[in-house]
């Protein structure tokens, strides 16, 4: 008879995700993972195959978690400007009991040049973020909140670039006030221009 697992897979994956998010792939050892996840090394291999596979699953877990929260917050917003402010707030303030910054951005910087799987996941995450921004910008253009001088997709790429920089800076000791100044200026650029 097969022995039943003594852990819930999503719970231990969440712990691995936070560790990778905090430390990155290279700095995280198998011993670190076993200790943080609270499972035996054999169970880790039986369930997740190897460190690389676990890392890719952790990236997927991160994306599901963040995307769900971002989309929900945007849908609850009453205006495009409020939706955009929510996204910036989510990124600058982060989540309670989670590392700062973005696991996908961190992973892209650390590994995308030498790991095709990580590169593909990062590019997919970036594309999805730009799609979210394009939806917000289109909404704002239709409501008159945002300029129509540029295509929504162009402004979405610009917003994503600004957000990526903020996500990197959020991992440093840069004060949140500076991140908010960048966010406010970025949102100001979207306002309709007179004349």
Image (cartoon, helix red, strand yellow):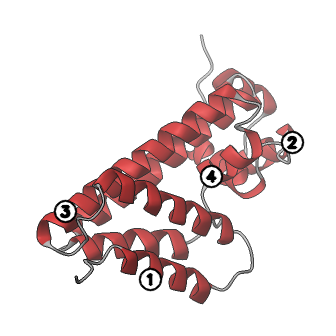
Q: Is residue 79 above or below residue 131?
A: below
Q: Which dot marks residue 184?
A: 1
**Residue 98 seen in the figure:** no
Provide the residue designation for mark 3.
Answer: 139
Which is more foreground, mark 3 or mark 4? 3
Which quarter of the rendering shows the C terminus? bottom left
Separation (CA) of disc 2 from disc 1: 43 Å
**Residue 72 seen in the figure:** yes
Which is more foreground, mark 1 or mark 4? 1
Tell me the crowding category of disc 4: few under 14, some 14 to 19, or many 20 or more residues within 10 angstroms, Cα based: many
Separation (CA) of disc 3 from disc 4: 26 Å
Separation (CA) of disc 1 from disc 4: 22 Å
* Among numbered discs 3 and 1, the one appearing first in the sequence: 3
As rendered, which of 72 and 135 lies closer to the eye?
135
* Among numbered discs 4 and 2, the one appearing first in the sequence: 2
Provide the residue designation for mark 4.
Answer: 105
Q: Secondary structure at mark 3?
A: helix
Q: Secondary structure at mark 4?
A: helix
Separation (CA) of disc 3 from disc 2: 48 Å
Provide the residue designation for mark 2.
Answer: 31
Tell me the crowding category of disc 2: few under 14, some 14 to 19, or many 20 or more residues within 10 angstroms, Cα based: few
């Amino acid at each position: 008879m097969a022995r039943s697992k003594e852990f819930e897979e999503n719970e231990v994956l969440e712990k691995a995700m936070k560790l990778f998010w905090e430390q990155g792939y290279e700095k995280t050892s198998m011993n670190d993972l076993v200790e943080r996840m609270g499972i035996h090394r054999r169970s880790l291999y039986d369930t997740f195959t190897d460190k690389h596979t676990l890392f890719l699953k952790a990236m997927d877990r991160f994306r599901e978690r963040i995307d769900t929260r971002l989309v929900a917050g945007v849908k609850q917003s009453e205006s495009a400007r409020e939706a955009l402010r929510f996204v910036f707030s989510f990124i600058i303030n982060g989540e309670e009991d989670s590392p700062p910054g973005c696991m996908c951005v961190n992973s892209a910087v650390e590994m995308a040049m030498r790991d095709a799987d990580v590169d593909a996941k990062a590019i997919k995450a970036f594309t999805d973020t730009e799609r979210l921004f394009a939806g917000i910008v289109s909404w704002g253009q239709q409501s008159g909140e945002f300029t129509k001088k540029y295509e929504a997709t162009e402004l979405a790429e610009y917003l994503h670039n600004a957000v990526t920089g903020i996500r990197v800076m959020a991992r440093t000791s840069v004060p949140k006030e500076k991140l908010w100044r960048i966010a406010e200026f970025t949102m100001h650029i979207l306002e309709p221009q007179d004349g």
